[in-house]
Image: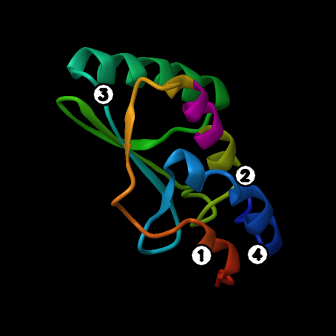
Amino acid sequence: MTSKLDPEERKALLRGLEDTGWRAAESGDALIKRLKFKDFSAAWGFMSQAALCAEKMDHHPDWRNVYNTVEVTLTTHDCGGISVLDIELARALDALVDDQGEVDRDIGRPIMRLADEVPE
């Protein structure tokens, strides 16, 4: 079973994700990112690529799609929070986006605040 990141791991691994638009869920136990694409086809294309990537990693996102918007939530249900699998998948999804999706930064809360919180 994958374990929840400890405070030091969180601090080190979360660095840089906020710059690409990842935010912390209000609960602090998940990463979220909302992307807006040119149209539905571009959004669906991203989701198709992301699905293949997630399947290969054997770690799957929770996500929602409405027309040209995709909201991705990453958490590891087995450990009840953020694990290294979520960080790795976030980085892999970032590599797929390249500059095709506009990031909505008005969701969640600053991710680096998670690095300073001590998980229960």
Q: Secondary structure at mark 1?
A: helix
Q: Which mark is residue 84?
A: 2
Q: Secondary structure at mark 2?
A: helix
Tag 3: amino acid: Phe
Q: Which mark is residue 7?
A: 4
Q: Where does label 3 land, which residue?
A: 37
Task: Please state which of the two labelled residues, at mark 1 or mark 4, is closer to the viewer.
Answer: 1
Task: Please state which of the two labelled residues, at mark 2 or mark 3, is closer to the viewer.
Answer: 3
Residue bounds of the magenta highlight: 90-95
Q: Is 118 situated above or below 75?
A: below
Q: Secondary structure at mark 3?
A: loop
The CA span between labels 3 and 1 is: 28 Å
Tag 1: amino acid: Arg
Q: Position of residue 61 (x, y in %)?
A: 47, 41
Q: Looking at the image, which residue is at 64% across and 84% down?
A: 120
Q: Badge 4: how crowded within 10 Å, few (<14), some, or many (20+)?
A: some
Q: Which mark is residue 27?
A: none
Of the residues under marks 1 and 4, which one precedes in the sequence? 4
Q: Badge 2: how crowded within 10 Å, few (<14), some, or many (20+)?
A: some
Of the residues under marks 3 and 4, which one precedes in the sequence? 4
- Quarter of the view holding residue 71: top left
Q: Quadrant of the N terminus?
A: bottom right
The CA span between labels 2 and 4 is: 12 Å
